[in-house]
Image: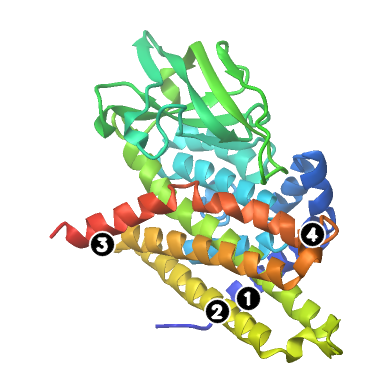
Amino acid sequence: MQFELSEEQQAFQDVARGFAQDELAPFAAEWDRDAIFPVDTMRKAAALGFAGIYVREDVGGSALTRLDAALIFEALSAGCTSTAAYMSIHNMASWMIDRFGSDEQRSKWLPDLTTMTKIASYCLTEPGSGSDAASLRTKAVKDGDHYVLNGSKAFISGSGTSDVYVCMVRTGGEGPKGVSCLVVEKGTPGLSFGATERKMGWNSQPTAAVIFEDARVPVENLIGEEGQGFKIAMMGLDGGRLNIGACSLGTAQTALDTAKAYMQERKQFGRPLADFQALQFKLADMATELEAARLLLYQAAVKVDAKAPDATMQAAMAKRFATDTGFRVVNEALQIHGGYGYLKDYPLERHLRDVRVHQILEGTNEIMRVIIAREMLKD
């Protein structure tokens, strides 16, 4: 067991923290208010190696570990939760191509994705299949050297802006074995996008439906083999769950730091709030729970990298605990600020709106419990 970060990990964690402080935090409120998708800023992050964190080096990736990625996303989310979370989605989609794509596919798409010259979206969820992802209905019927796609995807981050859509579609029968993974490029005839959703949070990234109406996609865009798509999706989500948990941790740590500073400055009844034991206990519990979540998430990241037998269960545990803890810590930080925490002049209400969705996406926290219990009881 090794609890200290290596010098290399400390170095890129510091780089990510500096980027968050200089390039994300000063603009996060504006991006949230005006629904600005900061593509140019994300390309600056890509220049630091943050767009292909665990993509191989021959196509421009950084070839780092899942733990490294968690450290980076935890640091980035301190600046802007929503933008860091989108970077996580882009990394997940790129990894799927890197891990399961052919050399030709990797060379075609990944050099542009690792620089974010092109942007990627991940398309699994549908209007009728959320938690029950294996029941997806989007059909891909082979017609010569193309698949013809019909159906739609819901709640897709980057929809309409992204250049590359890594899509799970049904090429076979019912259930997970009938699902395949296709890359659909922007500009494909028959590909269109729904209206941008009006969301509680995550406003620095657009979210909309992706719609296929007789969209013709080359057979050569199939990632892996037919019927392998659900496996690819679930393996991708193990890492995605770690990253979104890390984004909760980073946001919660920022909220905790803000609350601590406020308690030391704000006075009531002639004393700083930091002198009141009730608030001291609240701060102590927030810090303790956050540290426990961090350790669980780091352990899960190591297990996913090692392909440990219990990696999926550990990733589910970490996602559930980190996102629940992150939301609680942010909520308590807002409460410590009283009425000021409810104002947009302070970042707490934005933090709260942004982390709330982490308990829903990449598999709801109820589904995380299903995964954990299933793994515990399967023997």
Q: Mark 1 or mark 2: which comes first in sequence? A: 2
Q: Are marks 4 and 2 in contact (CB under 8 Å)?
A: no
| Residue 283 rendering spot, x and y as whole percentages | 64, 81
> Residue under circle 3?
309
The residue where tag 1 is placed is 10
The kind of residue tagged 2 is: Leu
Q: Secondary structure at mark 4?
A: helix
Q: Amino acid at mark 3?
A: Pro
Tell me which corner region of the image, top left, top right, bottom left or bottom right, holds residue 352: bottom right
Asked if residue 311 is positioned above or below residue 189 in the image, the reply reads below
Question: Given the current orientation, which residue lies at the most extreme left position?
Answer: 379
Compare marks 3 and 2 and give the one earlier in the sequence. Answer: 2
Q: CA distance from mark 1 to mark 3?
A: 29 Å
Q: Label 4 belongs to which residue?
A: 25
Q: Secondary structure at mark 3?
A: loop
Along the line of sight, the residue nearer the viewer: 132 or 165: 132
Verify CB contact (< 8 Å) between mark 1 and mark 2: yes
Q: CA distance from mark 4 to mark 1?
A: 21 Å
**Relative to 202, is 228 above or below?**
above
Amino acid type shown at disc 4:
Ala
Q: Residue at x 65, y 71 (%)?
A: 253
Q: Residue at x 45, y 65 (%)?
A: 321
Circle 2 is placed at which residue position? 5
- Of the pair 150 and 366, the residue shown nearer to us: 366
